[in-house]
Image (tube, helix red, strand yellow):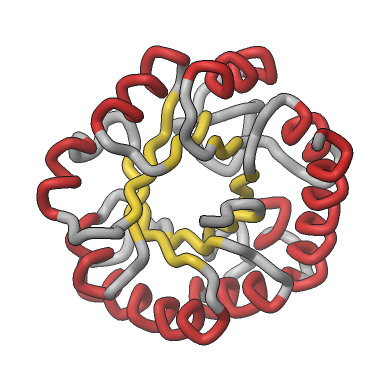
Amino acid sequence: MVYDLYVITDEKIGNGRSHTELARQAVAGGADVIQLRDKNLSGRDLLDTAVAIRDITQDTGALFIVNDRLDVALAAGADGVHLGESDLPIRYARRLAPPGFIIGASVSSVATAVRAWEEGADYVALSPTFATGSKDDAGPGHGLSTLAAVRAAVPLPLIAIGGINAGNVAEVIAAGADGVAVISAVVGEDDVTAAARDLRDRIATAKARVR
């Protein structure tokens, strides 16, 4: 699985553009993963949105992940679900998920990353890597030293999320991240497609330097 550019949709940060439109534009710019994240939609509306995004990603080959809601992810035929540290435990989600279903996990330390790995996560995301205003409950950034320590501790794909942008993505990749998850750096831009394309190019360049 390729997780290089992982774009999380947010209608508020996206200046009122719908999750579906943000997903369409991000995929056009080369996003490898789209995550639907919305804490306010009803279950029915979230499912309707998920089904629409599933259609977009199926046409392009991008992965589609639903944040938190395993039920919605399964009903929509998503590729996977992303679980926070206070969400449904990974080991229980794995019991309900079909073979090949992706379960990603937010982690905040080496210990939580190792636990996620042992419970069956397919990837881990250090959240937040840097301080960010995109998520009210994110807390202070853990920094590149923690990112590098998680990289050394677990063999899973490692995603960095929180405060990542065109100016710091190269150092994030150099510290060991396999990919970056962003909200503002892509969906907060006027031209979502161009922002995604630029960030993906920067990731590719940074990876070429560390190989």
Above or below, 26 relative to 171: below
Residue at 75% x, 73% y: name it. 193
**Which quarter of the picture shows residue 101?**
bottom left
| Front-lying residue, 67 or 204 | 204
Residue 167 shows up from this direction: yes
Above or below, 83 relative to 54: above
> Residue 150 appears at what percent x and percent y?
53, 20
Position of 114 compared to 2: left or right?
left
Residue 39 shows up from this direction: no
> Residue 69 appears at what percent x and percent y?
25, 55
| Front-lying residue, 182 or 32 | 32
> Residue 29 appears at what percent x and percent y?
73, 72
The number of numbered badges drawn on the structure is: 0
| Front-lying residue, 137 or 202 | 202
Image quarter in which the C terminus is found = top right
Residue at 37% x, 76% y: name it. 49
Residue at 46% x, 15% y: name it. 110
Residue at 83% x, 58% y: name it. 201
Above or below, 9 relative to 48: above
* Residue that protrudes farthest toward the front in the picture: 211
